Image: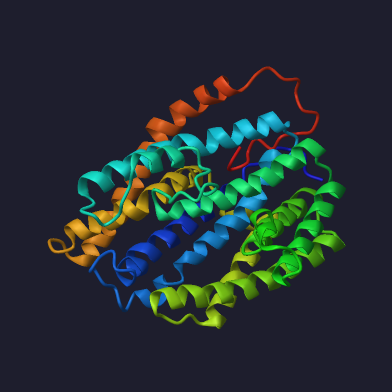
Amino acid sequence: MRTRPERLYEIDGLRLLAALCVVLFHYVFSGWAGGKTTVTFVTESAWAKYGYLGVDLFFLISGFVVLMSAWGRTPRQFVVSRVVRLYPAYWIGIAITAVVTVTLGQGLFQVSLPQVLANLTMFQSVPNIENVDVVYWTLWAEMRFYLLMLAFTFIGMTKGRIMAGLWGWLALTFLVELGLLPGIADLVVQSEFSHYFIAGMALFMLYRFGLSVQIALLVPICLGNAVYRAIGYAEAVGTRYSVTYSPAIITAVVVLIFLIMTFVALRVTRVLARPALVTAGALTYPLYLLHAHVGFILFARLEDTVNKYVLLVAMVAVMLGAAYLVHRFVERPLAPRLKRLLSKREPPAHAVVPAGSPTA
């Protein structure tokens, strides 16, 4: 069993890779396919249209690192860690997106003050208020996952309790998919993506405790369901954008995602770990928050004046630069202050907290 804190630097690199896949999906494919810009990348879209699968990698990583971060923490410590991690960059992302939309958007997107205020809570989906930026839908999925993790911190985390919880969550996933539970149950179960969170948590258990029969069964079952749901999701995306997706490619990408994270859990990827990747991980969240609507608006503004490939490279570079500025001048100074504000003196948790977690 691992008890020594360890930073898994390669996960930081994977997170940035996943974010860039989503960025290219939006800039090279969905922007023009969805009518947000006339800058077309018809040839390049053959591969860029698969970039949304970066979100699938995000969810698998999240299952791994959030359990790693939560292990040994009290409920209050876990909540504080999530608020500190998520909200500072999110608030500035909303502000920037709203200002750009109002001043430069030319009606491409709509935003209102009540909408912005609701979005600041990150719970705007509860009253069904539209997101300020389309990418925020994944944050609602993450928030519901965090609520489940919070329940584990109240119960107390042990190997047996976590594994029992994962099997129970997987069983509920299948019951929802079979129509044996009411649709509202999926608000908690999240059957569309639960297999990624479950598998990620199981892979953390593999990393921490080593291989067991339960993990050897659980992860492949999650993989099978992930492939099944990913192919169905691809059909829906294809219908939306009037394109076709190859089930073979979807399957290959999902399998590769699971394989890479399994290698991380087994520490096969240790040779790729570099401290410099911490910066890559730090850029991921603000890049994800900022790139979509702001990027579409800038593409629409500049599409007639700049070569499309120059514009694409420049846009990605600008967004990476903006992400760095948000991390350097918002997250880094604000996070410790917010943590002190929300924290109170507590007796130290008995279990070892893996301080090297990418989300700790």
The answer to which of 244 and 317 lies nearer the viewer is 244
Query: Residue 201, image x and y in percent?
Result: 71, 53
Q: Quadrant of the N terminus?
A: top right
Quarter of the image where one finds residue 190: bottom right
Query: Residue 38, image x and y in percent?
Result: 23, 69
Q: How is the image coloured?
A: rainbow
Query: Residue 216, image x and y in percent?
Result: 80, 65
Give me the residue at 70% from left, 57% from top: 185
Q: Is residue 224 left or right of residue 93?
A: right
Query: Residue 18, image x and y in percent?
Result: 49, 58
Q: Is residue 275 left or right of residue 99?
A: right
Spot the residue most to the left. 305
Q: How many marks?
A: 0
When the figure is inspected, residue 202 is found, relative to residue 332, above or below; the finding is below
Give me the residue at 21% from left, 66% from top: 308
The answer to which of 191 and 49 lies nearer the viewer is 191
Q: Is residue 93 left or right of residue 347?
A: left
Quarter of the image where one finds residue 260: bottom right
Q: Is residue 162 left or right of residue 231?
A: right
Give me the residue at 73% from left, 72% from top: 178
Give me the residue at 57% from left, 76% from top: 231
Any part of residue 45 in sight: yes
Q: Quadrant of the C terminus?
A: top right
Any part of residue 156 in sight: no
The answer to which of 246 and 234 lies nearer the viewer is 234
Spot the residue most to the top. 345
When the figure is inspected, residue 146 is found, relative to residue 243, above or below; the finding is above
Quarter of the image where one finds residue 155: top right
